[in-house]
Amino acid sequence: MAILGNLIARSLQLRKKFNLPVASPETYQKYTLRQLLDRGQYTLFGKHYGFGSMLSKEIDLATKFRTTVPVHTYDDMYNQWWHLCQEGKENVCWPGKVKYFALSSGTSESASKHIPVTQDMIKSIKKVGFKQLYSMANYKIPPVAFEKGILMLGGTTSLFEKGEYYEGDMSGISAKNMPKWMSSLLYKPGQKISKRTKWEDRIRLIVLNAKNWDVGIVCGVPAWVQIVLERVIKHHGVKDIHEIWPNLSVYIHGGVAMDPYRESFKRILGKKMTYIETYMASEGSFGFQARPGGGIKLVLNAGIFFEFIPFTSDHFDEDGNIKPNPKTFMVHEVKQDVEYAVLLSTCSGAWRYLIGDVIKFTDAKEYEIAIVGRTKQFLSMCGEHLSVDNMNRAIETVSTHLGITIREFTVAGFPEDNRFAHKWYLGCDDANANPEQIKTLIDEALCKLNDDYEVERTSALKEIYVEILPSKTFIDYLRFKGKYGAMNKFPRVLKGKQLDDWTAYLEKSKVIG
């Protein structure tokens, strides 16, 4: 394995010395769209929308595609098309039969979504993974890190047979299809442990085996990675994780923003780490942080065609539902620091699919983005336009200023005395955490970050409240909802039935406790 790691490290440095030819973002995306339409023209979806006719004419293909094919939500795609794949039908939205369905572990609906995963999508994910590996030459990562194990904290690799197809976590599908040399030499916790269906069993075995491994890179959702590392530290009676894994140098994270967790991570580390953000979902792998200090660089030539819809009241209603016929922009048409909802057309048979993420371009020329929220996860009861990005940064401010660890949080809004209020639920176990002090810091931070919020705090947004809960409350609730595991995230904003379920759970827990 040391030889392999050495080869990887040397190849990265060698690659950095060459200036490889790069096409423009527009060229990459137009070529990708043409490839997708060419492959999809003989499917039921492609015939329905006339892909073949689009390809046979001298037209602006992107414009024709956008004016012919409507925007689809998950329910649109599943109810009209994807359910046929589950019934064993071929050539529905992509050539051939769909062998895998990823069970989305998102933060919204309680029922899992079934996302088709084709062999072309698996190839796309591998391609993006290798591109990310090459980009690590831009970081000052010790070569020894590439000689060590890569701990991937994802879903189980056990897939469940459902007649014509298999279903499971996307991370598990990816791990099951990773190159054999990587699986046998570098991948931790290894296929034997990863096949365990219960997340708690996988954690227990990871903790027990931690001292037998030499881990250089960790990948996973911040909240769950933190839980696992803390349990390793506690079980083995050490001060920090680097006493167990001295060569741990890189943390590749995604799923939620890292900002609220940075302070708490510092307390479990003995050395500095390189943090690299990725953009992955059940629908595919879309990009990664390719340089220190940069945003997430979208990968534009891996079988995914991107469109961007301004996240404004012109295109979305107050609940985050998309309005008919939205105006969309390609990657070369976007503006910096404007919030956009993301549309995908992919080599898994998603077509003009609203994935639910809201992003902004931090560097439009380099097509680098930051994920700032979800279309259904924002607060704007009275025009305060509070995004998840605002919330994350406010929590980071509190954690840094007070030196406390806030493991999880969520926010709800409600009417109060003919005006409105916000309530913050914080998962924090620090005895000295003061709700009033935290409230003041959150309020001040949001007023600085968000002009609309600052204005509404003097008028319609009457009050904010802070309730501090044991951090395990959030994990226990996920377990109660059947969403306990490495790929599940707690929603940052609670509305409607989600809020009702949460408050009912808290009331019941207090009665029981």
Image (cartoon, rainbow, N blue to C red):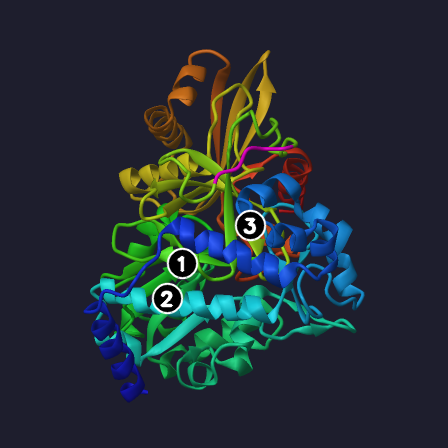
Coordinates of residue 174 in the picture (x, y in percent): 53, 71
Q: Which residue is drawn at 40% across and 29% down?
A: 439
Q: Which of marks 2 and 1 is nearer the N terminus?
A: 2
Secondary structure at numbered mark 2: helix
Could you give the CA–CA distance between mark 1 and mark 3, rounded to whole angstroms? 22 Å
User: On the image, numbered disc 1 is attached to which residue?
Assistant: 253
> Along the line of sight, which residue is nearer the eye, 426 or 297?
297
Q: Residue at x 53, y 81 (%)?
A: 191
Residue 123 in magenta stretch: no
Could you give the CA–CA distance between mark 2 and mark 1, rounded to whole angstroms? 16 Å
Question: Mark 1 is on which residue type?
Answer: His
Q: Quadrant of residue 238?
A: bottom left
Would you place residue 34 above or below residue 387 in this image? below
Residue 38 in sight from this viewpoint: yes
Q: Residues within 10 Å of mark 2 (few under 14, many from 20)?
A: some
Q: Which of marks 1 and 3 is nearer the N terminus?
A: 1
Coordinates of residue 486 in the picture (x, y in percent): 52, 62
The numbered disc on residue 101 is none
The numbered disc on residue 344 is 3
Question: Mark 3 is on which residue type?
Answer: Leu
Q: What stretch is highlighted in magenta?
A: 325-329
Q: Which of marks 2 and 3 is nearer the N terminus?
A: 2
User: On the image, numbered disc 2 is attached to which residue?
Assistant: 131
Q: Main secondary structure of the magenta part?
A: loop
Please name which of the two marks, 1 or 3, marks the residue nearer to the observer: 3
> Along the line of sight, which residue is nearer the eye, 6 or 504?
6
Q: Which residue is drawn at 26% across and 50% down?
A: 293
Residue 426 in sight from this viewpoint: no
